[in-house]
Amino acid sequence: MKLRATALAAMLAAIAAPAQAGDFTSLLENTGPGPDLKWGTADDTDAIGPGVDGILGTADDTTVKVSGANQPAGDKLYLQTNNVVASGSNANVPLSIDYSATEWRTAAIGGTVPRGTPTASGTLSLIDYHVTTGITLGSDTIGDAYDFVFRDSRDNSLVFGTRFVLGQSPSYADDAELNFMYRYGFVEGDKVFDVKAAWLFYGDFDLRMYNASRSDVRSLTGTPLLDLNAVAFQADVNLSEGNPFSGMYLLKTDATDYKWMADAIGYYQAGEEGQALLYSSIGGFAPTVAAVPEPSEYAMFLAGLGLIGAVVRRRLRA
């Protein structure tokens, strides 16, 4: 869908001007594993709706999908970017991002504070990144995919970042349209990782996140079904239509570590203007639980400490 020039201009102006914004937002508002405390069984609560007050956008919503808005002041998913320090070798790689978060809801049932009330600030510090150049869709090479892992100073959480940059090489086709971008790997054994979504302006050609859902949805209409292993970002990254050709989408998790995983990142052209329905995936980072040392490893560690202590004592007596 082509973005109106006025809407694009308004979004780009928000980069330089402070604005009310949002925060990392849970994709499982008031959903849960039910009374048995196990996901994937019959008593899971994964309904989608406005909650008991009948008003969408208030604290009691039940949803696996969170939608933003076409203006920063009303977008619960938008993080206000205060300062970015980019890598000297690649401007598309942020070494750190300072952000501010605010309350996004309007005052409503439940006594929520007014939208725009500052709540927190933090810095996303880059831990690791990977660039997949020359990603393909069908028979076309369309662009590059940037995959990031950040540490958030606000709460020490790991934040995974995705940024596609389309058509910026003469050899890249400029008519691909990414309607959905995905990340996978949010279930590991019995562990279901918590996920909170946000987006920010990293550059002048970044498009907002229309919505995010805990799903593997492949349709522009209808209700996304809960898929705990997947997160889908909907947008309309498209160079040929005059839309922004990139976007920075973030997922904060409760993971204690990260790993490399095949097919961790996906992207989909949904045929909005009659294009072919095309999906592809690439490797990327995924959340994991830090390994707990085996008892034998603890014993070796303690033995090593004892040996060091013995050496120090001998030197003191010498």
Image: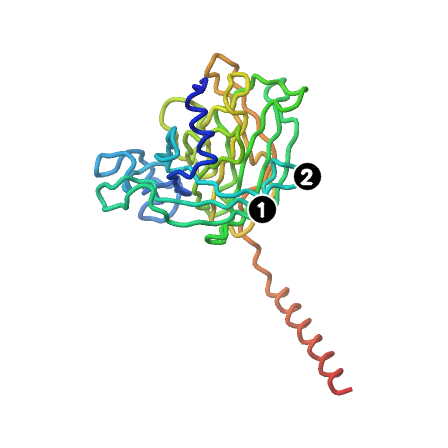
In the picture as drawn, the residue positioned furthest to the right comes out as 318
Which mark's residue is nearer the viewer, 2 or 1?
A: 2
Which one is in front, 76 or 99?
Answer: 99
Relative vertical location of residue 178 with respect to residue 64 in this rendering, above or below: above
**Residue 103 figure quarter:** top left
* Distance (Cα) linking label 2 and label 1: 14 Å
Question: Percent x, y for residue 170?
Answer: 67, 20
Q: Is residue 113 left or right of residue 317?
A: left
The disc label shown at residue 286, or none: none
Question: What percent of the width, then of the height, locates residue 172?
Answer: 64, 20
Any mark on residue 126, and which? 1
Q: Which residue is farthest top?
A: 274
User: Which residue occupies the extreme bottom position in the image?
Assistant: 317
Q: Secondary structure at mark 1?
A: strand
Task: Residue 7: give x, y in percent of width and height.
Answer: 42, 23
Q: Which residue is mark 2?
A: 89
Indicate the amino acid at tag 2. Answer: Ser
Residue depicted at x 78% and y 86%: 318
User: Dot 2: few (<14), some (14–19), or many (≥20) neighbours within 10 Å?
Assistant: few
Report helix, strand or loop for mark 2: loop
Q: Earlier in the sequence, mark 2 or mark 1?
A: 2
Could you say which quadrant of the image residue 58 lies in? top left
Horizontal side of 30 relative to 182 (left or right) equals: left
Q: Amino acid at mark 1?
A: Leu
Camera-side residue of 197 and 257? 197
Indicate left or right for 240 with 314 as reference. Answer: left
At x 46%, y 31%, the residue is 233
